[in-house]
Image (spheres, rainbow, N blue to C red):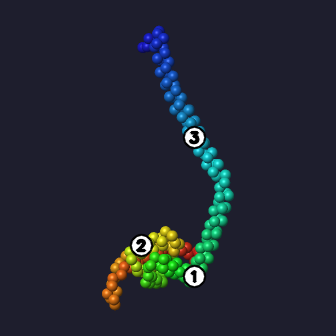
Amino acid sequence: MFDLKSYKNKNKLLIAGSVLFGILAYFMSFGKTLDLYMQNKDLDKKAALSQNAPEEIKNLKKQLGVYEAKMRKFGQDSLSKDEYRLNILTQLCKENNVVMVSLPESFFQKEATESIETQEIKLRGTFIDLLKLVYTIEYKTSLGMLASVKFATEEDRKVRIQYLYSYLYIQNLKNKKNEN
């Protein structure tokens, strides 16, 4: 089959065998060892991160307690909450040269564990002023989530002038366990 008498053929066969042995050794043992080494390295990193986990859990529970206490305090008196909204909206309307036309009572949509409070606000002004106010309410205040904005022109029939109105819908989520 092979002429093994020459050194050249013996060296070719030795190199081919070495390469084959190297490939087999890698797939049989070295590959698994390297995979386990990488996995061990990742687990060591995770273990180092979990060393401080009890402390971080305590801190997060403290923060949660503080936030829940603030939310309970804020939600205890609905009249003061409505007054807070009215004060903030009045201040923002003055800053943006906008007139608050109506601020009716909030309506609630009740679910199993929470209720959604929706507040409708009707404002009148120029488009730019209304847009600035909408931006401020959405991104710079804590009145709630701005769910919808609608712009409409309506004519005042007494003086025959058209005004631009903006209808804002602000929603707040309330847990039923915090309402008690």
Q: Would you identify the image quadrant in which residue 25 lies?
A: top right
Q: Report which residue position mark 2 lands on.
A: 131
- The residue drawn where x is 65% and y is 58% is 56
- Crowdedness of circle 3 by 10 Å Cα count: few (<14), some, many (20+)? few
Q: Report which residue position mark 3 lands on.
A: 38
Q: Earlier in the sequence, mark 2 or mark 3?
A: 3
Q: Would you identify the image quadrant in which residue 162 lies?
A: bottom left
Q: CA distance from mark 2 to mark 3?
A: 54 Å
Q: Report the mark closest to the observer, 2 or 3.
A: 2
The secondary element bearing badge 3 is classed as helix
Give the answer, above or below, for where 104 lies relative to 64: below
- The residue drawn where x is 38% and y is 79% is 165
Q: Earlier in the sequence, mark 3 or mark 1?
A: 3
Q: Amino acid at mark 3?
A: Met
Looking at the rendered image, the quarter that the N terminus falls into is top left
In the rendered structure, the answer to whether residue 149 lies left or right of residue 141 reads left
In the rendered structure, the answer to whether residue 129 lies left or right of residue 112 reads left
Q: Are marks 2 and 1 in contact (CB under 8 Å)?
A: no
Give the answer, above or below, for where 107 lies relative to 64: below
Return the residue nearer the eye: 90 or 68: 90
In the rendered structure, the answer to whether residue 76 lies left or right of residue 1 reads right
- The residue drawn where x is 48% and y is 14% is 10
Q: Report the mark closest to the observer, 3 or 1.
A: 1
Specify the label residue 80 is tagged with.
1
The secondary element bearing badge 2 is classed as helix
The secondary element bearing badge 1 is classed as helix
Looking at the rendered image, the quarter that the C terminus falls into is bottom right
Q: Amino acid at mark 2?
A: Leu
Q: CA distance from mark 2 to mark 1?
A: 27 Å
Q: Amino acid at mark 1?
A: Ser
Q: Residue 41: image x %, image y %? A: 60, 42
